[in-house]
Structures are given as C-alpha cells and as structure tokens.
Amino acid sequence: MSESRPVPEVTPETERYWEAAADGRLLLRECQDCGLTYHYPRALCPDCFSDDVAWLEAAGTGEVYSYSVARSMSGWPDDDLPLVVAYVELDEGPRMVTNVDCDPDEVAVGARVAVRFVDVDADDVAIPVFVLAGD
Ligand code: ZN
C-alpha cells in the first residue's frame, strides 16, 4: 500500500536499527556514560559524545508532541497524502520525527500513539510510523 515511499539510507551506524525495524522492533540508543536515551541512532551520544552507547528496545508507545499536516510532498505518493508529520515523544523520553497514519482531523497534541512498521521497496527495511492508540 505504501511501497513507493522513499527508502531510507542504511549506513553501518544505522544498519542494526533498520534490521530491527524490519523485524517489527523499534530500537533506541542509551548512553552508558550519562544515561541519555536518544533517537536517531547515532554512534556517539549527542549530549556527552561518549561512544559507550547500548541498544535499547522501545515499547513503541508515546504521545504526539507536535504535528503538521502535509498536503503535498515532493517524492511522496499521492495515495499517502495528506500526511500527518509529527514529533512523537516516546515513553522512554526521546522525540522522533515520524508520521501518524490517521485522519488529519483526528490527531491532536498529547494523543497517545503506538508504532507500526511500513514495508518499503528495499530488502530488510521497514519504516516506523505511528497510529492513534485510542486510549
Ligand atoms: Zn552521554
């Protein structure tokens, strides 16, 4: 249904993240020096620049921190528009830029959301998006 979405660039730094996503799991990174949990999965802690960072599996739940509605987007399939582009604050703390797959009239700041994974035209890659959790 959404197979023509852009395919993310997989690098050695993010390979494990994308592999887990293809497997239906959302990974975060947790700094072993300062304790920061963060997303996107960079190899160095964005706060203290430590390279002693572990992988942490997120519960995949959170809430909408902010959002906007894109009614046209270059390179994006028309069938997927309008698109709700949101900052989702995960229950573990990090915020990630993602999409909320819902009617734009139904999304709201503070709405509870849960992760889903959308397959794309690339081996072993799936994109984390969110849906309204309805609680
Ligand atoms: Zn750190």
Image (cartoon, rainbow, N blue to C red):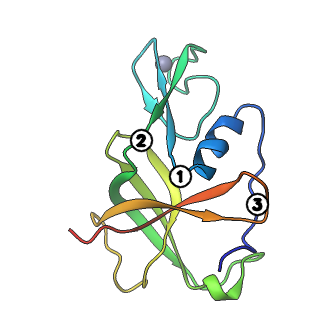
Q: What element carries label 1?
A: loop
Coordinates of residue 69 in the picture (x, y in percent): 50, 78
Q: Is residue 77 left or right of residue 33?
A: right
Of residues 20 and 72, the one drawn nearer to the viewer in this rendering? 20
User: How far is mark 1 from mark 3, CA to CA?
Assistant: 17 Å
Displayed quadrant of residue 81: bottom right
> For the residue with label 1, is its CB less than 8 Å from the closest atom of ligand 1?
no
> Eyeballing the image, is 40 above or below 1?
above
* Neighbours of disc 2 within 10 Å: few (<14), some (14-19), many (20+): some
Residue lying at 50% horizontally and 46% vertically, measured from the top left: 26
* Residue 28 image offset from top left, x and y in percent: 50, 36
Q: How far apart are marks 1 and 2 (CA)?
A: 11 Å
Determine whether 120 is above or below 94 in the image. below
Position of the N terminus by quadrant: bottom right
Q: Where is residue 37 in the image (x, y as percent from the top left)?
A: 43, 30
Residue at 37%, 45% (x, y): give it. Answer: 59
Classify residue 58 as left or right of residue 54.
Answer: left
Disc 3 designates what residue?
7
The disc at residue 80 is none
Q: Which residue was labeled with disc 2?
A: 58
Q: Which of marks 1 and 3 is nearer the N terminus?
A: 3
Determine whether label 1 and label 2 are within 8 Å by CB. no
The residue at which mark 1 appears reads as: 24
